Amino acid sequence: MGSSTLCCLISMTVVFFLLIIPHAMGDGATQARINFICKQTDDINYCKGVFNAHLPGDVVDVKGLTQIALTQTLIYASDTQIFIRRLEAGNNSTEIKNLLKICEVGYGIIVDEFGNANLDFAKGDYRSMLFDVEKCERFVNDCINVISGRVPELKVKNLHSKVLVRMSFISGRELNGGRSNVHSIPPVGN
């Protein structure tokens, strides 16, 4: 590689890191909010990656983070439900099909509840939004428990879904003044 090509490559790399990366990462306060939320999930790096990939600008408040979490959870749960339906259709084992059906139904409920949560969020009814969200981790856990390694393709999807649901709950709880409903999700590790 010639020195002019190397110089050009280095210059482009510097421009990329100076202009693109800081914008995608948000300001210090935004990152502090993201860290606060993500430390309460099972996968801090996945959580941070989701938020940072969808930041609309440098400064994002808890309302904006809640919107990101709700939207990404709805999209991911819908995609996971479709994925499960494809696994069901391509599987010959009645036992596995029945277990996948439990997961499919659970993800259907998650999709419905997060659809409602997004509507409640849009109306500014954060208490109802939390009510919609807080029950959903149970459905992900049900799928994890019934499949328990029998369908390896679902392992990562379930873990990511669990993180997304928790992101939505934690950010929504903060948006609601740190208050949640009666049956709140316990902290990670409990």
Image (tube, rainbow, N blue to C red):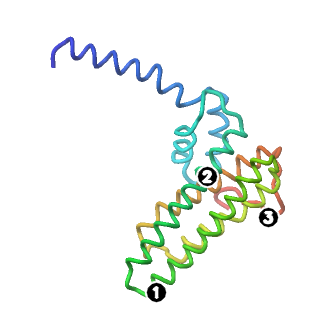
Image spot of residue 184 (x, y percent): 77, 60
Q: Nearer the viewer, residue 110 or 99?
A: 110
Q: Secondary structure at mark 2?
A: loop
Label 1, on which residue? 95
Residue at 55% of width from left, 37% of height from top?
Answer: 52
**Left or right: 95 in relation to 116:** left
Binning the other alpha carbons within 10 Å of mark 1 as few (below 14), some (14 to 19) or many (20 upward) gives few
Q: Describe residue 136's horizontal placement relative to residue 101 as left or right.
A: right
Q: Which mark is residue 183?
A: 3
SS type, badge 3:
loop
| Count of picture labels | 3
Residue at 72%, 40% (x, y): give it.
63
Q: Residue furthest left?
A: 1
Question: Tag 3: Cα neighbours inside 10 Å, few (<14), some, or many (≥20)?
Answer: few
Give amino acid for label 3.
Answer: His
Q: Quadrant of residue 6?
A: top left
Measure how far apart labels 3 and 1 are at the Cα level. 33 Å
Residue at 50% in and 60% down:
79
Cα–Cα gap, marks 1 and 2: 32 Å
| Residue 154 vertical position relative to residue 4 in the rendered view, above or below | below
